[in-house]
Image (tube, rainbow, N blue to C red):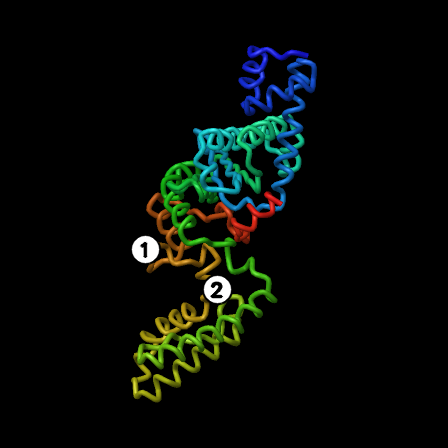
């Protein structure tokens, strides 16, 4: 059957597929545009399937916050290349996806992709012509006494949403702008959990040995360079600092004070500071991974938990962070190092 230029133009406008592919689709389907459209979709999906072994570790994050701060959604959508992530079609896809998740709250990625939106998502991916996938998403909700806010970094690769339970509506409203600052802290400092209480005991135990050995090796090199040595702790988390450990720490501090000849009558002025230092030195895992226990970037004298409490106090109330979600594009994905020459050779073979 002869295919007209008008038919090719119509199919190309509808599918954004290359002109020669549109012509072939029409020839294969006797000029039937709906059937040709399906044929192109199948062909596009098949091309994407050939890329299944490629790693989608680039992409963008998306964020949507309700005007009244009652709900917020974040999403991570991955692509193979940063070039595609700069494509306007891809950027619009991220906006549409976060809007869909925000409005309809699918239970997981599978449910999202099996919905009518999933079909639309696949159509857009076919037009872009690269492996693109929704990796993960999350939503937080807030009632009248819960403050909520979020932050998306300027590169659109890190998005954070966070909530804090407050004593009143007035405090919750007053805490919102401060929570955006905490969300910015979270973006930069990469916590993986809310509190040290969330850690698994076995995980803490396994991390302790490795981290202490790493510090000892660092000190060997520092000693060689005649530089100040790093403190090597006995512990790495508050989880390990039980009553017996703390009692022994206090006893050791007092013994050193006695040995140095400090009068016992001034020990009560010295010991609290030394105990605080002991805790700081022996909670490196908490400072690295637990949001509430990290030193707040805008006031390193306070932990995040203390900074939140202090700000709420200026509002005449109380507040405590209850949840956060932090998504960083490609985090935890091992990128495949492609051998471009080998890839070309394989395609030519």
* Residue 335 visible from this viewpoint: no
Q: Which mark is residue 285?
A: 2
The number of numbered discs placed on residues in the rendered structure image is 2
Q: Which mark is residue 162?
A: none
> Toward which corner of the image does residue 112 lie, by quadrant?
top right
Query: 322 or 166: nearer the eye?
Result: 322
Residue at coordinates 30% horizontally, 84% vertically from top-left?
262
* Whole-percent x, y for residue 8 in the image: 57, 15
Residue at coordinates 49% horizontally, 69% vertically from top-left?
236
In the displayed structure, does residue 16 sit left or right of residue 67? right
Residue receiving disc 1: 299
* Whole-percent x, y for residue 210 in the image: 52, 71
Identify the element where label 1 is drawn: loop
Q: Earlier in the sequence, mark 1 or mark 2?
A: 2
Query: 186 or 128: nearer the eye?
Result: 128
- Determine whether 242 is above or below 46 in the image: below
Distance, label 1 to label 2, CA atoms, is 20 Å
Which quadrant is the C terminus positioned in? top right
Which quadrant is the N terminus positioned in? top right
Residue at coordinates 38% horizontally, 58% vertically from top-left?
295
Residue at coordinates 35% horizontally, 71% vertically from top-left?
273
In the displayed structure, does residue 3 sit left or right of residue 94? right
* Whole-percent x, y for residue 239 in the image: 53, 66
* Residue 33 visible from this viewpoint: yes
């Amino acid at each position: 059957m002869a295919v007209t230029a008008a038919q090719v133009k119509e199919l190309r406008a509808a599918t954004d597929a290359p002109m020669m592919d549109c012509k072939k689709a029409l020839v294969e389907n006797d000029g039937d545009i709906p059937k040709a459209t399906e044929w192109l979709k199948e062909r596009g999906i098949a091309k994407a399937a050939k890329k299944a072994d490629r790693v989608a570790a680039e992409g963008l994050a998306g964020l949507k916050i309700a005007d009244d701060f009652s709900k917020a959604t974040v999403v991570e959508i991955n692509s193979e290349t940063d070039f595609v992530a700069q494509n306007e079609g891809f950027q619009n896809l991220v906006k549409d996806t976060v809007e869909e998740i925000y409005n309809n709250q699918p239970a997981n990625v599978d449910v999202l992709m099996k919905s009518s939106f999933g079909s639309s998502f696949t159509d857009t991916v076919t037009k872009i012509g690269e492996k693109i996938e929704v990796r993960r998403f999350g939503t937080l909700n807030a009632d009248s006494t819960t403050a909520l806010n979020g932050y998306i970094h300027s590169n659109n690769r890190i998005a954070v949403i966070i909530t804090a339970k407050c004593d009143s509506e007035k405090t919750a409203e007053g805490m919102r702008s401060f929570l955006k600052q905490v969300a910015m802290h979270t973006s930069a400092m990469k916590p993986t959990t809310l509190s040290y209480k969330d850690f698994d005991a076995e995980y803490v135990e396994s991390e302790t040995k490795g981290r202490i050995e790493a510090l000892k090796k660092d000190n060997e090199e520092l000693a060689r360079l005649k530089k100040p040595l790093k403190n090597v702790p006995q512990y790495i988390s508050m989880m390990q600092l039980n009553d017996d450990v703390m009692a022994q720490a206090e006893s050791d501090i007092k013994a050193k004070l006695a040995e140095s000849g400090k009068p016992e009558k001034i020990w009560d002025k010295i010991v609290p500071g030394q105990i605080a230092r002991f805790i700081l030195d022996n909670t490196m895992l908490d400072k690295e991974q637990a949001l509430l226990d990290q030193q707040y970037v805008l006031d390193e004298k306070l932990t995040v938990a203390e900074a939140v409490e202090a700000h709420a106090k200026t509002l005449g109330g109380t507040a405590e962070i209850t949840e956060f979600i932090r998504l960083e594009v490609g985090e935890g994905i091992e990128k495949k190092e492609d051998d471009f020459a080998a890839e070309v050779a394989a395609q030519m073979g």
